[in-house]
Amino acid sequence: MDAASAAVAPKKPASIEGLLELARPDMAKVDALIRERMQSPVSVIPALAEHLVGGSAKRLRPLLTIAAARVAGAQDDACLKLAAAVEFIHTATLLHDDVVDSSQLRRGKVAAHLIWGAPASVLVGDFLFARAFELMVEAGSMAALEILARASRVIAEGEVLQLTRAHDLNLSQELYLEIIRAKTAELFAAAAEAGAVSAGASPAHCKALRKFGQDLGLAFQLVDDALDYSGESQELGKNPGDDFREGKATLPLLLAISRTGAAEKAFWDRVVGRREQADGDFERARELIRMSGADAATLDLAAEYAIRAKAQLADFAASNSWRPALEDLADFAVSRRM
Amino acid sequence: MDAASAAVAPKKPASIEGLLELARPDMAKVDALIRERMQSPVSVIPALAEHLVGGSAKRLRPLLTIAAARVAGAQDDACLKLAAAVEFIHTATLLHDDVVDSSQLRRGKVAAHLIWGAPASVLVGDFLFARAFELMVEAGSMAALEILARASRVIAEGEVLQLTRAHDLNLSQELYLEIIRAKTAELFAAAAEAGAVSAGASPAHCKALRKFGQDLGLAFQLVDDALDYSGESQELGKNPGDDFREGKATLPLLLAISRTGAAEKAFWDRVVGRREQADGDFERARELIRMSGADAATLDLAAEYAIRAKAQLADFAASNSWRPALEDLADFAVSRRM
C-alpha cells in the first residue's frame, strides 16, 4: 500500500474472517439455494451457471444482505431467498458484461462466452435474472421486490452509460462516479436495503444500511479499478489491464491523463481514444498511473467512502456482533488485493 | 391458403378489427405507459427502445392481457401496467434473440444491434426486462408477479434449448413443440393468466384463459414458422428464410426432411446440418416444403390449436363482447399473412 492511502486505511490488511464465521450457517443455506435454483432440465444452463458459481465467487453481495438483515435484528430466515436472488442478479450481469466487454477471464476461469458462446451467455444471464425474481416472489416482500427491480434497472442504465462514454478521455470525475454508483454501488445498496426491509427494520435503519451498501460499493469499485492497473491476474481472478485494453475511462486513467498533461496527450489519444495499442503500452500506462499518483488517489477516495460507510452503522448497537463485522467488510473493500 | 388447412380454418381471413376497437381506450393507455417507462436519462435507451416500439409492433401480448382481464369482468385499470410489463418482457426477448440469431430485420426495420451494436441491444434488453418488473411491482399483484417471473424463466429455458438443438435434423415433433411452448406460448399463456388474475377471476377462469393463451401462442408460432418459408418480407416485417439461413429446425423443415426421405438427405445435411448454403438453396428448400405438404401440415396443426383455444372460452358469457373478440384473435393467428 502506498503512503498516501496508508494515512486513512487500516494499518494491517483487514480481514472478513469474523463476518464469514458469523454468517457461515446462513451462507451455507444461501449456497444450497443457489445450487438448487440454478438447475434446469436444459443441461447447458446448470453447466454454464456452475462454471461461474463454482469459481472463486466472493459472494459479497448476498453476504451483505444477510449481515444487513441480522444487524437489523432479523431472527427468521426471510433474508436467505433475497440473498440468493441478489447473487443471481449479480451473476446475470457478469455474464452479460463479459459478452459486452469481450472479457477473457472471470473469477479465475476462462469467461463463459468463450466456452459456450455469447448467445448462451446472454440467454443463461436472462434465465438467472428471471430466477432471481422467482426467488423474490417466494420471499414474499413487495418492498424488497421494488428495491431489487429498481436496482436491476439502474444497473442496466449504468452499463449503457459506461458503454457510450467508455473511450471519453474527458469524462469528468463526477460522471465516472455516477457510472459506478449505478453499475456497481446500486446493487450493494439494494442488497443491504432488501435485507434490512426483510428484517422489518425501521425506515431510518433501512436508509442507513442502504447508504452503507452504496458507499461500500463505491469503495469496492474504486479499488477494482485501481487493481486493474496494479493487481496480479492470479490474485484477481481476471486479467489486469482489461479496462485498459477496452479503453475504459476509469478513475486511475482519468486522473493520470489530467496529471500527465500535454506531454502524454498523444499517447492517451492513441491507446484510449482510438484504442490503437501495441506491446508495452499497458506497462507504460501503468507506470504513468503510478508516477502521477493516480492509483494512490483512487485508493484514497475508496478509503473515504469506506469511512463514510462505517459512519452509517453508528445507530446500531455495538453489542450486536454483526456491526463490527460490517465495519471489517468496509475496511476489507479497501485493503483487499483481489 | 391451401386445401388441407382450408378445411379447418375460417372461410375468409379473420380480422381482429373488432377486438382492436373494443380495446382501443385501454391500448391507448398501455401505449402511453410504454412510452413513458422506456424513458431514461441515458439517451441511447429511449432511442433504441423507440426503434422497436415505434416499428410495426402488433402488441398482441398486451392486447391479450387486456382482453383476458376484461372478458373475466375487470372493471378497473389494474391490468394496464401488467399489459405494458408483458410488452416490455417481449421486447427485451426480441432484442436478445436478434443478437443471438444475428437477425438482420425486425418489425420492418433494420435490427437494433446492427445500428447500436450487440452490447447496447443486450443491455437495453436488460433495462426493459427490469422495467417490466418495476411495472409489475406497481401493479401490486404478487400472483401476477409470480406468473410473469416464471414465464420469463421458461422463455429463457426455451431459447437455450432451441440454441442447443438448432441444427438437429432429427429433432422430434414433440421436442419442437416443447421448444415453442416455452419460448413463445408461455408468454401468451402468462399474459392472459396475469390479466385474469388481476381481474380477480375464479381459479377455473384463470386456468381457462391461461390455456387459451398457450394454445393461441402455439398456433401463432406454428404460423410464424410456416411464414418463414412462404411469406414476403414486406408483409412479415422480417426476412423470410431467416430460420433456414440459421439452420433452425422448425416444423415445416422437420416435416419436409422426414417426407422427402433419402433422395434429399444430402441436401438437408449440407444446408441445415452443416449450414453450407449457396444461392438457390432457400428456393429449393421452399419448393420441397411446399411439394411435400409440410407447410400445409404446419398450418393445419396451427388451426387445431386455434380451435382448442376457442374451446377454452366456452365458460364465458356469450353476451360479453370480449369473448367473440378473443375467438377472432384465435382465427387471426392462423389466417394472418404477417
Image: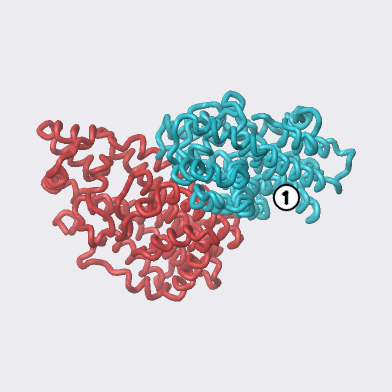
Chain colours: A cyan, B red
- Host chain of mark 1: A
Q: Residue at x 27, y 42 (%)?
A: B246
Name the spot of residue B102 as percent of width and height, x first. Answer: 33, 46
- Residue at left offset 52%, top offset 43%: A248
Label 1 element class: helix
Q: Is residue A312 left or right of residue A41?
A: right
Residue nearer the viewer, B152 or A119: A119
Circle 1 crowding by C-alpha within 10 Å: few under 14, some 14–19, many from 20: many
* Residue B222, horizontal then vertical, whole percent: 28, 51
Identify residue type, mark 1: Arg
Q: Quadrant of residue B189?
A: bottom left
Place of residue B328 in the rendered image (x, y in percent of width and height, measured from the top left): 32, 66
Q: Quadrant of the N terminus of chain B?
A: bottom left
Q: Quadrant of residue B320?
A: bottom left
Image quarter (top left, top right, bottom left or bottom right) of the C terminus of chain B? bottom left
Q: Nearer the viewer, residue B64 or B306?
A: B64
Instruction: Return the residue found at the far top.
Output: A234
- Residue named by callout 1: A210
